[in-house]
């Protein structure tokens, strides 16, 4: 005989749904993408050229430094966030499209 009251079972189902919704959201926006959104797309959103820019990580770093030096990026993300941003840019906007140059 089952003894779990219906209300309790409903609660567990709701909890499970809430949890899976949360993890789905986490996966949708990776941290570097969020920094890009918050710090760069404020200006570069809908900007055709930024979508086509393909750079190495070092070149992205130069571009980001230039943006920061021009006081465009405000507030300036923490070092950790900048590293995530560069990882994201190098991964998604590297020279050869997706993954960037071959690693040796
Ligand atoms: C306040 C607005 C603003 C923000 C925020 C901003 N930029 Fe820019 N960005 C510009 C302007 C204006 C130019 C053109 C002038 C120049 O190249 O210095 C530019 C140029 C660039 C270029 C050169 C290619 C192009 O499209 O002309 C790159 C690459 C770039 N930005 C990347 C970034 C990245 C990455 C970030 C986030 C870290 C960022 N920008 C944040 C305004 C901004």
Image (cartoon, rainbow, N blue to C red):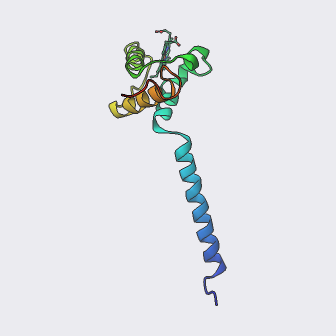
Asked which quadrant contains residue 74, the reply is top left
Front in this rendered view, residue 77 or 91:
91
Q: Residue at x 37, y 14 (%)?
A: 69
In the displayed orientation, state which residue is furthest to the left: 79
Front in this rendered view, residue 86 or 44:
86
Q: Quadrant of the C terminus?
A: top left
Left or right: where 22 falls relative to 85: right
Is 77 situated above or below 50? below
Q: Residue 78: x and y, percent?
A: 35, 31
Q: Residue 32: x and y, percent?
A: 46, 34
Q: Residue at x 47, y 29 (%)?
A: 91
Is 81 situated above or below 52? below
Left or right: where 91 falls relative to 8: left
In the displayed orientation, state which residue is furthest to the front: 104
Is 66 situated above or below 34? above
Q: Quadrant of the N terminus?
A: bottom right
How many marks on residues?
A: 0
Q: Residue at x 66, y 79 (%)?
A: 6
In the displayed orientation, state which residue is furthest to the bottom: 1
Front in this rendered view, residue 41 or 56:
56
Q: Residue at x 40, y 33 (%)?
A: 84
Q: Residue 70: x and y, percent?
A: 41, 12
């Amino acid at each position: 005989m089952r003894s779990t009251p219906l209300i309790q079972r409903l609660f567990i189902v709701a909890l499970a749904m809430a949890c899976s919704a949360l993890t789905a959201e986490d996966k949708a926006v990776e941290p570097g993408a969020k920094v890009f959104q918050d710090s760069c797309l404020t200006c570069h959103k809908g900007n055709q050229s930024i979508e086509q820019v393909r750079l190495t990580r070092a070149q992205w770093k130069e571009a980001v430094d230039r943006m920061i030096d021009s006081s465009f990026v405000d507030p300036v993300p923490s070092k950790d966030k900048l590293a995530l941003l560069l990882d994201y840019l190098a991964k998604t906007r590297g020279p050869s499209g997706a993954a960037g140059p071959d690693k040796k």
